[in-house]
Image (cartoon, rainbow, N blue to C red):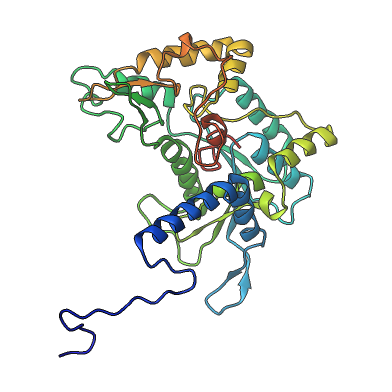
Amino acid sequence: MNRGYREQGKSKKPKAKPGFAINAEQMEYERRKLLEEMSTKVTKKSLNNMAAVAATHEPIYKDEEGKEREPTLRILSLGAGVQSSCLALMAQEGLTKHKPDYMIFADTGWEPSFVYEHVEYLKKNITICPLITVERSNIREDLIRAANPIPGGNEEWKSFAGRVPNPPLFAARPGGKVGMLYRQCTHDYKVIPIQKEMRRILGVKPRHRVKKGTIVEQWIGISTDEAMRMKKARLPWLESRWPLIEMKMSRADCLRWYRDGKKHPMPGKSSCIGCPYHHNDQWKNMQKNYPEDFEDACEVDDKIRHGLKNTEAELFLHKSAKPLRSIDFQEKPKQQSLFGETFDEEFQDECEGLCGV
């Protein structure tokens, strides 16, 4: 008989090992203990801290011979919110170790008026490098056209589940279940237009490869309290960098820099007018202080209701799956997330460091 196979009818008595579950009851106890430890010790703050520590060192680039070298370009992805604007203005004042060669703002066509005003302010005050605005198209118009296709038109066969750029809309199904659509809008309206502009600056023709050895260092305005949002670039010639984290700056530090310096206006939160990631405080502020923007969002919300082709799901901009204009924003949300925050707190800084920072 081959070794390793037990003779029929014989069995060995299991030996207890320190910290090792040897029966179903012990395994269940260990599982409950682990879940309890996770729920009490693993917090969003601690995960952000761990991620931030790993990104505090300046990246080192080397050539084929192993010698250190500078990147081909340094480009700041500008969202025109608190963090990326703080990073841009600090670079302008010589407070960063390096300076970007370009700053690029991707315009979705549906930004709040104060965002466009702040971009114009930055264009007047940033002199160390060009500040370029790029756009794919108007996401508001694309959204309405996709939800209400013209019979026989190019959009008739499409839906939000197809290649029409998907905002993370809330879908209410018969029976009361509410889910979110897969988000594609950040990639299509922010990431791709910025990468196309990078290729143009590099002199790369469409459908041509970027020259081997090219390194574009992309600065992203993610702060230490959002470190979990850091993602490595997927293109071989593109390297993501987070200077605010290297300087150990949180969003609060950025706000303090504006307040203490008293040189620059405080920017608002950069995101589309009708972004489904808005929390109730943002909707309430928009309704009170920017009524035209709020009415615009309500109009779009009304027009997208039946935009998901071949399903009975209704679409909404708000997580309650109710018409936006009917919601009382004085009520506090009750829904809890894995980390103990409300839904609003968990998603208030979404969009991968390009929207909302």
Residue 102 at x, y = what percent?
A: 62, 47
Vertical relation: 229 (above or below) 16: above
The quadrant of the image that shows the C terminus is top right
Residue 52 spot, x, y in % from top left: 63, 54
Residue 78 picture location, percent across and down: 60, 40
Q: Nearer the viewer, residue 160 or 325?
A: 325
Q: Classify residue 111 by image quadrant.
A: top right
| Residue shown at the point (67%, 34%) measured from the top left | 123
The part of the image, by quadrant, that contains residue 159 is top left
Q: Residue at x 72, y 46 (%)?
A: 128
Q: Is residue 185 left or right of residue 245?
A: left
Q: Quick check: can you spot residue 36?
A: yes
Query: Which residue is nearer to you in this view: 107 or 255?
Result: 255
Q: Going by the image, does 172 lie left or right of 332?
A: left
Check the picture and name the quadrant holding the N terminus: bottom left
Occupied quadrant, residue 286 = top right
In the image shown, does 32 or 356 lie closer to the viewer?
32
Seen in the image, is 181 located left or right of residue 340? left
* Residue drawn at point x = 32 percent, y = 77 percent: 13
Q: Residue at x 56, y 49 (%)?
A: 228
Which is nearer the eye, 129 or 31?
31
